[in-house]
Image (cartoon, grey):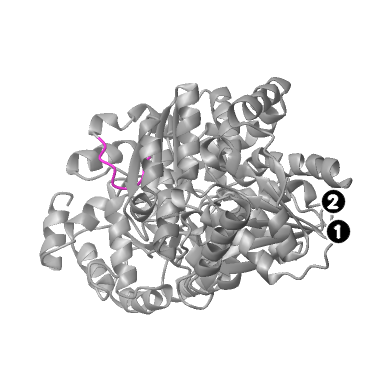
């Protein structure tokens, strides 16, 4: 079974480039050049030097001893929260800004949900001296104020997306409209493994450093680079794809993707796409999409802005359909409880997104010997207000 | 013969096509608008079926789509309205919208419903050319439906030739790479690009759209192509007030 993209830009039935003609030249330019640029030795050298000296990679693989004891397994946390800017998002923005430079682009646009991708994009734009415009839903601007302030301080223009549900989906629509209206000098840094081909493949390649390091670290720490389980949360799915990437072809490794159930999968306030969605097209690719019978995209809900998205990347849809990975869901409350537990047992405040992955440990049964890797995709600083309000701290 | 093909055989220039969103401003206005536009001299109609995430559209058409969806417009209702429309309207009618609602309806069912409702052509901006060619062209041709592709100032000559080969009906030439309703100055509209495409002697007729909002811009479109398409300016003109009066007033500028 091929779990990766084919020459037509598809993962099985999913993927493709469902874009209006106005976006074709930009997307085609990327499609023709991305692999050539990424595989170039100088590009690799510069990319890895920045990941090391600027981002602070490799990120530690930490054996969480108290959580391990509680769950009766060896729980390893892949500490993407320790990256510069506080999440995995920067792996991709470093890669894409270098690529945008190679393509001669002068202006960068991006969408953001929780603000982590917006901050990571504004950061690399400051680093390289490029103009930066970030689209963010009006609702997310309110619930992620610290990140909005960071983006502004980094010199980015933050534009409020006021259409639709005013969250990530609508910020993505606005960024695509910007790209249509600026077809020559602008590069769109999509923050997840979504969008038209080649974005899902390109973003997963940049994020694959997560699993590449994990394999080496596991080998050093356990004597085997093969864990029993790999867990990661999924909104669009970029941290999960980076965490799964080098394990996908090793079918002995069980991959578990955790979606946001919101107030419950059947509550009408959920973002559990594989449970609630159907095959369809959103933001330029064919995937699984939460939608009405008439094909209108449904407004999702999650306490976590980074998971509040009504679709998943096309590769995830393929892993789901072929049952290579298991897709499960965790509610708002379960994730917040898991976030507090990790904070108080390990001294790590996780992003609420990542806390969804941690929460699934409660639902698993272990026998004591399993090696389990959980992608701790981001830190919880941005979520303090939500935690404090929820727990009355 | 398909009504679009017939129109371009009978009329070579000054063709006026008007876009409006189905079910807007009122859910039941779809037929009345078509009748009024035909009476006021429109040559062709493009009826938008609304979608929740119209990325190629600017704020005016987005808002009309949302309003139509909120009042209950969907493809089933639209096809029912279109059957009534065809009893009264003889000019070519196209449907324009995004691919996801079409996929959920089923492409074959959609084409059949179009034919039964008297629709002559379809514009689906986010249906890629090779997908159409591989999966859907046969269904469209079998049903005698025209599929209309867009061309922008950035589209290469080679790609325009390919689009011309796959097109039937006409080619929709965008005056700029833009979302709908973007205010373009007449001088911004690049006539060198229009001339370049005109000189390619394509097999299909050409209609120019995007930024056509006045007599001046319409005449400019007609100078370089078989006619012009007006969308946002019309949708804006019928937002509030008396529908019939708005349509008469709007069309007086062009006819």
Seen from the viewer's position, the closer of residues B77 and B205 is B77
User: Is residue B61 left or right of A1 when viewed as pictured?
Assistant: left
Asked if the residue under mark 1 is in contact with the one under mark 2, i.e. CB atoms within 8 Å, the reply is yes
Relative image position of residue A118 (x, y in whole percent): 45, 41
- The reply to whether residue B160 is visible in this rendering is no
Seen from the viewer's position, the closer of residues A149 and A159 is A149
On screen, A240 above or below A53?
below
Q: Chain of mark 1?
A: A
Confirm whether the magenta stretch covers residue A117: no
Give me the residue at 18% from left, 61% from top. Answer: B238
Which callout, 2 or 1, points at the residue further toward the start of the chain? 2
Q: Quadrant of the C terminus of chain A?
A: bottom left
As measured in the structure, the alpha-carbon distance from the residue carrying label 2 to the one carrying label 1 is 8 Å
User: Is residue A35 left or right of B78 when viewed as pictured?
Assistant: right
Relative image position of residue A244 (x, y in whole percent): 72, 51
Residue beneath disc 1: A252
On screen, B33 above or below B216?
below
Dominant secondary structure (helix, strand or loop) of the stretch shown in magenta: loop
Relative image position of residue B246 (x, y in whole percent): 13, 61
Report the span colored magenta: B175-184
Give me the residue at 40% from left, 55% from top. Answer: A385
């Amino acid at each position: 079974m091929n779990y990766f993209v084919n020459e037509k830009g598809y993962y099985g039935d999913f993927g493709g480039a469902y874009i209006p003609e106005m976006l074709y030249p930009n997307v085609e330019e990327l499609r023709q050049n991305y692999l050539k640029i990424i595989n170039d030795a100088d590009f690799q050298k510069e990319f890895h030097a920045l990941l090391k000296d600027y981002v602070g990679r490799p990120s530690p693989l930490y054996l969480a001893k108290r959580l391990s004891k509680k769950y009766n397994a060896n729980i390893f946390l892949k500490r993407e929260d320790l990256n510069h800017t506080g999440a995995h998002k920067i792996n991709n923005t470093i890669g894409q800004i270098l690529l945008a430079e190679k393509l001669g682009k002068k202006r960068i646009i991006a969408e953001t949900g929780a603000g982590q991708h917006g901050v990571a994009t504004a950061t690399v734009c400051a680093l390289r001296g490029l103009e930066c415009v970030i689209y963010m839903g009006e609702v997310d601007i309110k619930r992620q104020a610290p990140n909005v302030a960071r983006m502004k301080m980094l010199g980015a223009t933050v534009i409020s997306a006021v259409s639709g549900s005013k969250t990530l989906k609508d910020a993505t629509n606005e960024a695509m409209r910007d790209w249509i209206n600026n077809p020559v000098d602008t590069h769109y840094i999509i923050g997840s493994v979504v969008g038209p081909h080649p974005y899902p493949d390109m973003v997963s390649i940049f994020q694959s450093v997560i699993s590449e390091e994990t394999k080496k670290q596991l080998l050093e720490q356990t004597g085997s680079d093969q864990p029993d389980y790999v867990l990661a949360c999924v909104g669009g799915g970029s941290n999960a794809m980076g965490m799964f990437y080098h394990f996908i072809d090793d079918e002995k490794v069980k991959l578990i993707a955790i979606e946001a159930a919101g107030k419950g999968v059947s509550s009408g306030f959920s973002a559990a796409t594989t449970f609630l969605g159907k095959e369809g097209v959103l933001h330029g690719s064919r995937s699984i999409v939460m939608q009405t019978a008439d094909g209108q995209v449904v407004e999702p809900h999650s306490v976590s802005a980074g998971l509040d998205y009504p679709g998943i990347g096309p590769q995830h849809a393929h892993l789901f359909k072929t049952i290579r990975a298991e897709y499960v869901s965790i509610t708002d409350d379960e994730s917040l409880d898991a976030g507090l537990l990790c904070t108080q047992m390990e001294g790590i405040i996780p992003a609420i997104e990542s806390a969804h992955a941690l929460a699934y440990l409660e639902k698993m049964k272990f026998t004591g010997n399993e090696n389990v890797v959980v992608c701790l995709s981001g830190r919880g600083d941005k979520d303090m207000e939500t935690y404090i309000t929820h727990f009355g701290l | 013969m398909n009504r679009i093909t017939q129109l371009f055989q009978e009329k070579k220039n000054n063709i006026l096509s008007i876009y409006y969103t189905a079910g807007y401003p009122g859910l039941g206005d779809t037929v009345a608008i078509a009748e009024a536009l035909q009476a006021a001299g429109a040559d062709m109609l493009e009826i938008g079926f609304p979608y929740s995430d119209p990325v190629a559209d600017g704020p005016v058409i987005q808002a009309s789509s949302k309003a139509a969806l909120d009042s209950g417009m969907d493809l089933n209702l639209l096809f029912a309205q279109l059957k009534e429309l065809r009893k009264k309207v003889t000019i070519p009618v196209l449907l324009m919208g995004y691919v996801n609602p079409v996929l959920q309806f089923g492409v074959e069912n959609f084409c059949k419903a179009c034919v039964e409702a008297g629709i002559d052509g379809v514009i689906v901006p986010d249906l890629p050319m090779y997908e159409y060619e591989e999966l859907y062209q046969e269904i469209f041709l079998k049903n005698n439906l025209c599929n209309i592709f867009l061309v922008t100032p950035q589209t290469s000559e080679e790609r325009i030739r390919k689009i011309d080969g796959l097109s039937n009906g006409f080619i929709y030439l965008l005056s700029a790479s833009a979302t709908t309703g973007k205010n373009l100055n007449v001088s911004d509209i690049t006539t060198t690009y229009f001339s370049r495409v005109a000189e390619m002697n394509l097999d299909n007729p050409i209609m120019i759209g995007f930024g056509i909002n006045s007599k001046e811009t319409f005449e400019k479109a007609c100078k370089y192509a078989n006619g012009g398409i007006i969308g946002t300016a019309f949708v804006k003109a019928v937002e509030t007030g008396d529908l019939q009066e708005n349509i008469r007033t709007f069309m007086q500028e062009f006819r």
